[in-house]
Image (cartoon, rainbow, N blue to C red):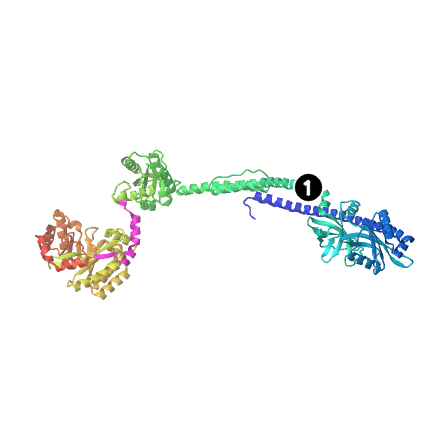
């Protein structure tokens, strides 16, 4: 059995123990009382049995004496001898009346009997004659017509034995009641006779005789017990002499135990009442004691739960015992935990270097505000300044800067958000007011800070985000302000408000890139080809392979998006390897269609430092004998020039054409242009799109074409969209043109169909 409460367990335990002890005492008392009552009854029954024995003997002696008077009467003997039956009957009746017996008879030695007051049946006469003659019984129980009689016989001598005078007294209920009256206790007396089916009440009517089981006739007259319909009863069975050996007789004295226990009922009642009252008092006392013991424990339990939930908890100390000392120690522990939690909370919400609140504290304040502005200040050239003055000094500088900005913003709480970033929350009427305040704070912070006796100049860039404007991509206003700092620096402004459109969906793009490898396996990628027109051959002699991704849910994905993300996540190599394999297969299809073109493939600068990629590309090209050209950007070489130039030399040595892509869009260097073993130079479309509008662009394009020719390079102009630009390029001596005027990127089947048509005529018409 289990209990949820200790007080219940204690109450049940102690009450159960007391109840068990009380039950044992009650059993002992009941056993002792029952034994005492049984002993008293047995003693009384034994005494009553002895009294009845004396009464039986006394009655037998009286009957024997009366019978002897008649047996010794000479006249009676002569009447018996002469067979004078009237005189015999008269004498018997006279003496029966004087002796007050139920019957009197005389039986001769020949078995002939004369009786008055009763009628002998054959069985009773035979039993009487047999008992008197062969067994010498002169007193005993004689059953006549089913009724028991106490019979006493006296021999009649003349001078020889001629018969017996027999007096019989009926053993009926009245006589037994007289016997019961002799006992000190209300006994029940019955005369038993034994038949073929056991002992019977001899005094009962034959039709109503009830067998009495489990009766043992004891010669010593000791008492015993039997089970009756009314329960247990004490018995005393004494044997009685019987004229019929086949039907022995006995005296049965019974006394019910419930009568014997009646004198003790009051005692047992009071014992039960006292025990029940004691049990109730113990239960109440135990419950009270258990409550007193468990109340401080329950208080401790509740306090532990409050402490577990982060609440401060104390319990009253109500005693000086073990429980009181436990409560006192718990209070000390709770106080220590509270102090430690306070320190941990302070550490969790404050920057350890500057002592300012940290990012978490700022985010909590921002979450509690609605419509306020989070301004994040980032120290420009933070790493340079930190390396110049040291980490400790930089921490002190940020602390001083935070105090300055807080003072300038009317005491707004300042927080250190990152290594070189501070943030605060302000109120502003609208976007313009918030940005104006942020710009003013940035200008005020430009004042040099005196640190270690020397002034330190710093500059700040601020990003702003409104706490009430949630963005699905960035939920935190602090994070949006951090993105706004990057957006401000991207446009070279001191402040910027977070622009969700410019930020886009980086999370969605990241999940998109995670699907790129699966897309390559599922056939979602394809190659489109943009024609490159050769001015001298007046035909399309080369095409540029451009990867296209058709997503099953998002549709067409922009190449600028997935190529850039692939470079940043390291997926650019498997994408480029797929492009090379597919381009080789398409080159074979073009040859089969009768068009032997050069296929240009863009190679990321991240792959120019990967010798294993170079091994793969050269092995694929050598196995297929395809005419491929690798387009690379000049800036890609700058990251790792030695390895990149060595790989480019391997491409050139293997006969793979190399093209310098987007020339002029970055920091073009003549030194790298001189070192790169390239076959082609592609002028960036930013110069070609305005070629027919800007003389300066025309001069730059013409000089670039002449420079490339001087270095032995072919020149391809990108972004040719107007016939005028195409004509100018032809006049400048450009080798090839690529752009929407020549043809948009198209699938392989459309390219083959286009090549089979009059391409030269179309370009000529456009030029005209």
Quarter of the rendering containing residue 356: top left
Where does the image place residue 65, in percent across and percent down from the top left? 88, 51
Q: Main secondary structure of the magenta part?
A: helix
Q: Is residue 504 magenta?
A: yes
Q: Nearer the viewer, residue 620 or 461?
A: 620
The stretch of residues the image draws in magenta is: 502-527
Quarter of the rendering containing residue 730: bottom left
Q: Residue farthest to the left?
A: 768
Q: Nearer the viewer, residue 407 or 726?
A: 726
Q: Residue at x 26, y 44 (%)?
A: 501
Taking the image as shown, residue 694 lies to the left or right of residue 567, namely left
Taking the image as shown, residue 676 lies to the left or right of residue 310, namely left
Q: Is residue 115 magenta?
A: no
Where does the image place residue 19, in percent across and percent down from the top left? 64, 45
Does the rendering let one see residue 681?
A: yes
- The kind of secondary structure element at disc 1 is helix
Residue marked by disc 1: 269
Q: Count of labels shown?
A: 1
Does the rendering let one see residue 237?
A: no
């Amino acid at each position: 059995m289990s209990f949820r409460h200790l007080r219940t367990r204690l109450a049940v335990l102690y009450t159960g123990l007391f109840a068990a002890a009380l039950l044992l005492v009650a059993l002992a008392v009941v056993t002792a009382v029952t034994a005492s009552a049984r002993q008293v009854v047995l003693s009384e029954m034994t005494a009553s049995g002895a009294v009845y024995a004396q009464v039986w003997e006394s009655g037998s002696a009286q009957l024997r004496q009366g019978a002897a008077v008649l047996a010794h009467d000479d006249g009676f003997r002569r009447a018996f001898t002469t067979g004078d039956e009237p005189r015999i009957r008269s004498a018997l009746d006279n003496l029966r009346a004087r002796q007050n017996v139920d019957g009197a008879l005389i039986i001769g030695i020949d078995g002939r009997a004369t009786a008055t007051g009763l009628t002998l049946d054959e069985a009773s006469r035979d039993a009487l004659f047999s008992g008197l003659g062969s067994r010498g019984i002169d007193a005993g129980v004689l059953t006549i017509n089913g009724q028991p009689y106490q019979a006493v016989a006296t021999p009649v001598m003349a001078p020889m034995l001629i018969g017996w005078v027999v007096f019989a007294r009926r053993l009926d209920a009245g006589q037994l009641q007289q016997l019961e009256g002799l006992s000190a206790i209300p006994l029940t007396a019955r005369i038993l006779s034994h038949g073929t089916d056991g002992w019977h009440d001899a005094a009962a009517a034959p039709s109503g005789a009830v067998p009495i089981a489990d009766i043992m006739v004891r010669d010593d007259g000791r008492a015993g017990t039997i089970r009756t319909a009314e329960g247990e009863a004490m018995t005393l069975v004494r044997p009685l002499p019987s004229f019929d050996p086949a039907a022995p007789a006995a005296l049965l004295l019974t006394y019910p135990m419930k009568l014997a226990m009646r004198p003790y009922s009051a005692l047992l009642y009071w014992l039960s009442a006292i025990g029940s009252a004691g049990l109730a008092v113990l239960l109440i006392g135990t419950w009270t004691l258990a409550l007193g013991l468990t109340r401080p424990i329950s208080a401790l339990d509740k306090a532990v739960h409050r402490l577990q939930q982060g609440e401060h908890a104390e319990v009253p100390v109500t005693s000086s015992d073990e429980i009181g000392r436990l409560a006192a120690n718990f209070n000390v522990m709770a106080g220590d935990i509270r102090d430690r939690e306070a320190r941990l909370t302070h550490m969790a919400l404050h920057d350890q270097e500057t002592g300012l609140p940290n990012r978490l504290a700022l985010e909590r304040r921002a979450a509690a505000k609605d419509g306020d502005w989070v301004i994040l200040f980032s120290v420009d050239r933070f790493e340079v300044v930190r390396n110049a003055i040291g980490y400790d000094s930089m921490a002190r500088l940020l602390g001083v800067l935070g105090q300055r900005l807080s003072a300038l913003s009317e005491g707004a709480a300042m927080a250190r958000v990152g290594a070189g970033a501070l943030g605060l929350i302000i109120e502003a009427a609208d976007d313009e007011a918030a940005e104006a305040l942020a710009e003013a704070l940035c200008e005020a912070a430009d004042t040099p800070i005196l640190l270690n006796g020397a002034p330190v100049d710093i500059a700040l860039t601020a990003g702003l985000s409104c706490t009430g404007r949630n963005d699905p991509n960035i939920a935190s206003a602090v994070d949006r302000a951090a993105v706004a700092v990057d957006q401000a620096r991207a446009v070279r402004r001191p402040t910027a408000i977070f622009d969700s459109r410019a930020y886009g969906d980086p999370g969605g793009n990241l999940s998109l890139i995670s699907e790129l490898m699966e897309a390559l396996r599922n056939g979602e990628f394809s190659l489109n080809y943009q024609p490159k027109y050769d001015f001298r051959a007046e035909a399309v002699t080369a095409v540029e392979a451009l990867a296209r991704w058709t997503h099953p849910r998002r549709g067409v994905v922009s190449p600028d998006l997935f190529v850039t993300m692939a470079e940043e996540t390291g997926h650019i190599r498997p994408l480029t390897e797929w492009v090379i394999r597919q381009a080789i297969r398409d080159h074979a299809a073009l040859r089969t269609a009768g068009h032997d073109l050069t296929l240009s493939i863009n190679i990321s600068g991240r792959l120019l430092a990967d010798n294993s990629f170079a091994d793969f590309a050269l092995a694929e090209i050598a196995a297929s004998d395809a005419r491929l050209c690798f387009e690379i950007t000049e800036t890609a070489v700058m990251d790792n020039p030695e390895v990149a130039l060595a790989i480019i030399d391997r491409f050139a040595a293997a006969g793979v054409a190399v093209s310098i892509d987007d020339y002029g869009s970055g920091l073009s260097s003549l030194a790298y242009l001189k070192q790169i073993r390239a076959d082609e130079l592609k002028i960036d479309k930013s110069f070609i799109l305005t070629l027919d509008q800007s003389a300066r662009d025309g001069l730059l394009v013409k000089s670039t074409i002449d420079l490339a020719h001087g270095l032995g390079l072919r020149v391809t102009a990108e972004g040719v969209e107007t016939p005028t630009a195409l004509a100018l390029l032809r006049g400048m001596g450009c080798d090839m043109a690529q752009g929407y005027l020549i043809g948009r990127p198209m699938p392989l089947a459309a390219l083959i169909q286009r090549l089979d048509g009059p391409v030269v005529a179309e370009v000529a018409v456009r030029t005209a």
